[in-house]
Image (spheres, helix red, strand yellow):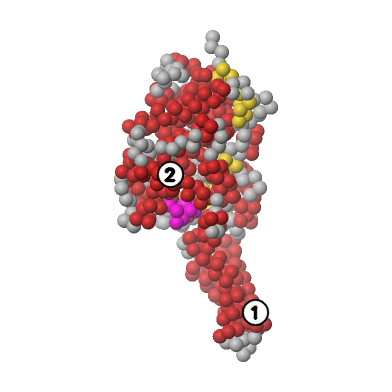
Amino acid sequence: MALPLVQVAALSLIAGVASHLTYFIHGEHMLTAYKLVIAALLYPPTVVVLLTTLTGLPLSHAVQLTSVNYGAYMTALFTSILTYRAFFHPLRHFDGPKLARLSQFYHFFRIRAKVDNYRHLDRLHAQYGEYVRVGPNLLSISDPDMIEVIFHPQSNFNKAEWYDIANPLLNLVQLRDRAEHDRRRRHGWDLAFTTKALRSYDSRVIKYADQFVAQMQRRAGEAINVTNWLEWYAFDVMGDLAFGRSFKALEKGQSHIYIDTMHQTSALPLGCLGTLPWVIQTMTALVPPRLNPFMTLVRYSDECIEERKQRKPTEPDIMTPILAAGPFYEDPKADALLLVGDARLIIIAGSDTSASALIHSFYELGRDANVVQKIREELEQHGIRNDDSLSITQLQYCEYLNAFINETLRMHPTNPGGLFRLTPPGGVKIGGHYLPGGVKVVNPHYTVLRSPKAFVAPNEFIPERWTTRPELIRNKKAFCPFSQGRFACIGRNLALNELRAVISKSVLEFDISFAPGETGRALLEDSKDIFTMSLAKLELRFTKRSRT
Ligand code: HEM
């Protein structure tokens, strides 16, 4: 029996367009993407086998028929998708690279070599303005006035599908449902970050700041790669506060497999494929867990949390109230997944971010001895010395120190490419155009925080803009390094304490300068944007301070 090829082709074309207009055009498909990929791969051989065995069709004809059917369906589907993206998508009015409107892979190909997402976005904004279509359904917004609109506590913008990247692994930051997220915050997390809880962590923050200073003392006068040492400080603090188990990187002067694996596993998925989360989902679903290096992190966290559950720490840690709050989900499996996810989150959210802020702070200290001098003078005016009397609470009142940290976070944001959000279900007006619900937006912090609309002399490092020269700030609301609203950083005050402690102790002990040959270029230009930053080498020299 010879099936009419023309009819098969026509029906397949119609099916291709219909499946786009009735299914693919609506909602999110990230969590089922791997199934679609498998179906697309298995469909042709399966149909050939079925046609030859069930209908007795000769193999050559079955192959021909399947090729026509598959080819026509795929051609129609992709033609329909591309036509829609080019001419009918709600973002069609926004400017941007022509190819970016057709496929998100364009963005991937532009950033894959240097893993410099935020710099690419910055270049696009310089070329196309404050609103740039950087993908078929992704609008990058560098207008500082929009930060309030998107991130205000009352804003209805929700988290985009990017937050499902590790699904079914789950944690607090990935809970996209607001009510569920709020409930989880109240279920132990908030208690772990009260003022009282933070005070109880102070001694551990001080302990690791002292270890850092002691290691620098041993290496005084030498060129030191502070990128490693400050990263180890951030990880050691979080390991201790999350699991009561420091990574001992500072003590040993060497990295830990957890830290190394985190770097190795982040560059491709988070750095290059951050705007293509469905690809990560699909890869994760198809690669056996044994071969997935990310699972090393999961297993280590699982072990730590199991061990932590068996042991009551001498001092409370972040897990204390979270464990004390008991099960969050009725389903024990879901509950266990959330618990290990949250344990992992404490390390991931608390280490890379703080490390980036720390390393850039020391870059600024090494670059300008005047800044070191000003921080030191302020500390001494407050009677603060680097000995047992130093209290983190006192440091909170040092205006210039805090201004220095603010200015570091402004010039060198820890999530420079911004956060992914979705326009609210009822739609919203953006950049003079109405956008329906479900359009993805991102706010590239690096560009927003260097906007002349928000800051005078935006490319200059001037801590005084946060103290004596407020006229240098045009829109304070553009500055929210810890985000704001319901999804804001819960670890903000802990992070600030870590920064204040190690910066203060260091400037009280040392003169800090760039090592010979260091310019800071590598740090600023070769660091990789992996949602947070994976930082390149920075060599500084710590010289025992000559007291007059
Ligand atoms: C300078 C250091 C830090 C910066 C700039 C920073 C920034 C941020 C930002 C921007 C978010 C929002 C992320 C999003 O919406 O996708 C966030 C969330 C979060 N951060 Fe931080 N963070 C820092 C340090 C810390 C530390 C030390 C911890 C300690 C555990 C921490 C824990 C968290 C958690 C748990 C969330 C999720 C909060 C939620 O969804 O309710 N962060 N952080």
Few, some or many C-alpha atoms within 10 Å of disc 2 (few <14, some 14-19, many ≥20)? some
Q: Taking the image as drawn, is residue 507 in sight?
A: yes
Nearest the viewer among 241 and 37 is 241
How far apart in space, not on screen, are marks 2 and 1 (Cα)? 54 Å
Report the magenta stretch's main SS. loop
Q: Quadrant of the N terminus?
A: bottom right
Q: Is residue 260 left or right of residue 209?
A: right
The answer to whether residue 176 is above or below residue 364 is: below
User: Please, what is the three-letter code of the amino acid marked with disc 2?
Assistant: Cys
Q: Do labels 2 and 1 touch, CB within 8 Å?
A: no
* Badge nearest the viewer, 2 or 1: 2
Residue at 48%, 25% (x, y): give it.
210
User: Please, what is the three-letter code of the amino acid marked with disc 1?
Assistant: Val
Q: Secondary structure at mark 1?
A: helix
Q: Secondary structure at mark 2?
A: helix
Few, some or many C-alpha atoms within 10 Å of disc 1 (few <14, some 14-19, many ≥20)? some
The answer to whether residue 158 is above or below residue 196 is: below
- Percent from the top left, x then y, of residue 535? 58, 38
Question: In the image, is residue 218 part of the stretch drawn in magenta?
Answer: no
- Percent from the top left, x then y, of residue 452? 55, 35
Residue at 59%, 50% (x, y): give it.
268
Q: Taking the image as drawn, is residue 492 in sight?
A: no
- Percent from the top left, x then y, of residue 304? 43, 44
The residue that label 2 is drawn on is: 304
Residue at 61%, 23% (x, y): give it.
541
Q: Which residues are magenta?
A: 162-170
Q: Quadrant of residue 330?
A: bottom left
- Label 2 residue near ligand 1, CB within 8 Å: no
Residue at 59%, 67% (x, y): give it.
78
The residue that label 1 is drawn on is: 63
- Percent from the top left, x then y, of residue 321? 33, 41
Nearest the viewer among 46 and 249 is 249
